[in-house]
Image: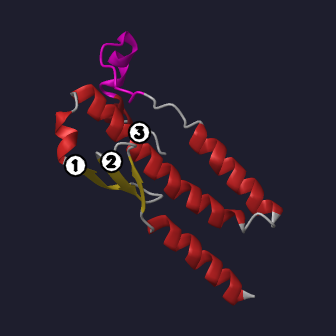
Amino acid sequence: MPDAIHSSLADVQSSLTAPHSAESPDGTVRAEATARRQTALHLSANALKLSPDTLATLILTTQQAAQNKAEAALTDHLETFRTDPRVATALDTLRDTQANPTPRTTPQTHRTDRADDSDDDNFVDSVYNSDRTW
């Protein structure tokens, strides 16, 4: 049994880095991607004749198609693990998390303009200089 598990995990690992490609309908743009990231973008000479907006849209849709193919291949490999209900639940949670990512929060900054901070200026000194035994 461990050999089957290792073999399945090796298939999943290889599907993370396996390249998948997509081409625009007119052949001017070709994109390659793995399940992890975009890996290549190829433009034909005719791509330079397109307007910037048209070319940008064509690039984005072609890259997305390549990424979708790569992610679909990974999903197919992961489906083999769904026979275990614990794994199925984890995969569903992962899928839902990827579909609805947590919104980014703005970094918290320290405010120095608060009126109640004035009593904190000498706090460390007052603790170290106190005659209390801690």
Find numbered disc 3 in the image and state the secondary structure of the residue it sits on: helix
Find numbered disc 1 in the image and state the secondary structure of the residue it sits on: loop
Residue at the spot of label 1 = 44
The structure's colour scheme is secondary structure
Q: Does 110 sit left or right of 98 as displayed?
A: left
Residue 129 showing in the rendered view: no
- Percent position of residue 9, x then y: 61, 76
Mark number for residue 61? 3
Q: Disc 1 residue type? A: Ser
Q: Is residue 51 magenta?
A: no
Q: Nearer the viewer, mark 2 or mark 3?
A: 2
Query: Mark 2 or 3 closer to N-term?
Result: 2
- Percent position of residue 118, x then y: 33, 16
Q: Disc 2 residue type? A: Gly
Q: Nearer the viewer, residue 21 or 2?
A: 21
Q: Find out whether the residues at labels 2 and 1 contact each other: C-beta distance under 8 Å.
A: yes
Mark number for residue 80? none
Read off the magenta span: 106-122
Q: Main secondary structure of the magenta part?
A: loop
